[in-house]
Image: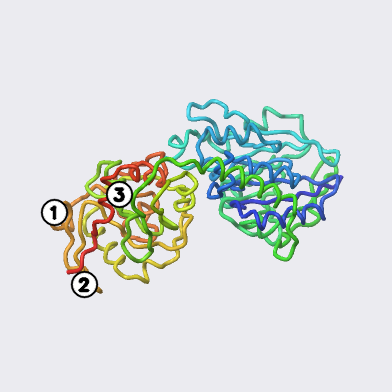
Amino acid sequence: MQLKILHTNDVHSNFDNFSKIASIINKVRDENTLILDAGDFTDFKNIALQGTKGQAGTDLLSIAGYDAASIGNNETFALLPTLEYMASNSRVPYISSNLTKKDGSKINGVNSSIILEKAGLKILLIGLSPDLGPFNPLLGFHLKNSKEAIKEELNENKGKYDLVILIDHIGTERDFNIAQEIPDIDIIISSHDHKLFQKAKIVNKTIINSAGEYGEHLGYMIVDYNGSGLSLLDSGVISSGDEQENQHVLASLKENNIIARKNLSSPLYFIDKSLTHDNIEENPICNLIADGLRDFLKCDIGLINGGICNGGIKKGPVTDLKLIEICPSPLNPTSFNIKGKYLRQALEESLDGSNCLKEGRGPGFRGRFVGKLHLSGGEIYCSDDKIDKILINGYPLEDEKLYSVASSDYLQRGSGYESLSKNQDTAYRAEYLRDIIRIYADKKEFIDNSFIERWVKS
C-alpha cells in the first residue's frame, strides 16, 4: 500500500508563499495523500492572526486540505487563551504530546495524538512542541519530557495503528537522536531549525524529512507499506517560487484582514505629540520604551535598541493595530545585572551608524535593523566618533560596578550587541515590548520625557 505525504514547516505566516504551496498541493494530491504541518505556521507578527486570535491561520490550513498540524513556539507566543481559542475552533487537528497548561492539565482543543486512516492504513500521528525554558510558565505552559511523552502515546495506542509519524518542532539534531532511541517511529517530519532536505534522510530505519522555511518549499515522501515494514520510494521538496497563487487562500486572507483590522482599530487613548522613530538616531518612541522599561522593572537604567520598532506613532489615536504594526516582535521585558564596562562597549558600538544598520537577526526579532541603543537613567556625552563620558543617574559609569538593566530578551542574549550577553541574574516578564508602549504612551510625563536627549554632543 502506497502513501504520499506532503508537508510544510516554519512557514511563519509567509502566506503569499503558502498560497502557492496550496496550489501545488491541489496538483499533486490524490486519495492516498496525507498533508501535515510541523509547526510555526501561525507567526503572530501577522495582523490577520492578531485580530482573529489565530483563526485566519487555521482557515488557511483547512482550505489547503491539511490533515493535522503540530504546535511550534510561535503558536504559543500569543499566550494560552489564544492557543486554546485557535485549537478549539480549528477544523484541522492540532497535536502536541508534551505541551500542557502550566499546572499540567490538558490544553483545550489540543490533541496529544490522533489516528487517521489513509491508503488503507491506520496512522498514529504524534506531535511535539519545543521547550522554551523560563518562558514556558510566563506564556502559561508546561513541557513534559519529549521522549517520555512519545512513549506514553505509543503505549496508550498499542495495537491500534500500522504506522507512526512524528510531526514535531524540536529541531533535526534532536529528531536524529529520537530516531536512534525510539525505533517504533516510522517517519519524522522535522522543523524548528528551518533545515531544507533535498532528499529524506534515514536514521535507524526512521525516515526524516524537513522542508526548509517560509513556504518556499513543499516537502514530499512516497512510501510503501507491505504489512511488515516500510520502504521509501521517493522524497524531496518542490519549490513554490514559480507557482500560481491559490485564489481561495488569498480571498480568505483578505477577508480575515478586514475583520482583524476592524477588531484592532478602536482607539485606546489619544496622544498630543508624535513619537517619531529612526534606526540610527535617538528618537522619542524608543526613549519612551527605555523609560517605560526602567519604571516597569524598577532598575538602575533602561536600555533598548531602535530596531525593535518599525516606525513611530503620529499625534492622535493609539490603537492595538498601530502597536502591532510598529512593534511586532514577540519579545519580553527582561531585567539583568551587568558590569559597567560591558555597557560602555555596547554604547560605543552604538555610536557607529553602520553598526546600527546591521541586520537584526535573532529569535523573536521581527524588525530589520539592530538600531541605536536608547538609554534611560543616564546620559552619554560624545563627539562625532567617540564617547567622552557616560553618567548613570548623575554619576560616572564604573567599569567594574554591577548595574541593574531593564531591557528585552533580545539584548539580554547579546543579539546585535554581543557584550550585553555577559550578564547575570536574568528575570523575564510575560508582557511584550509593545505592552510597554501601550502602558507608558498613556502617561503625559513619559511622553514629555521621551523628547529629552540622552546622547549629548560634548
Asked where in the image residue 109 lies, by quadrant, the reply is top right
Q: Nearer the viewer, mark 3 or mark 2?
A: 3
Depth check, front residue: 308 or 253: 253
Q: Is residue 72 left or right of residue 59?
A: left
- Where residue 135 sits in the image (x, y, percent)? 44, 40
Name the residue beneath numbered marker 3. 447
Query: How far across and how far down the image is residue 327, in percent?
Result: 44, 51
For the residues labelled 3 and 1, say whether their Cβ atoms are less than 8 Å apart.
no
Position of residue 330 in the picture relative to residue 380 (left or right): right
Mark 3: which amino acid?
A: Ile
Determine whether the residue tagged by mark 1 lies in a helix, strand or loop. Answer: loop
Residue 383 circle label: 2
Residue 183 visible at all:
no
Q: Amino acid at mark 1?
A: Gly
Q: What is the C-alpha distance between the residues marked 2 and 1?
A: 19 Å
Whichever of labels 2 and 1 marks the residue nearer the N terminus, that label is 2
State the CA–CA distance, disc 3 to disc 2: 27 Å
Q: Earlier in the sequence, mark 3 or mark 2?
A: 2
Distance of label 3 from label 1 (alpha carbons): 22 Å
Q: Amino acid at mark 2?
A: Ser
Question: In x, y percent, where is residue 416?
Answer: 38, 61
Q: In the rendering, which numbered label is found on residue 394?
A: 1
Q: Give the quadrant of the N terminus.
A: top right
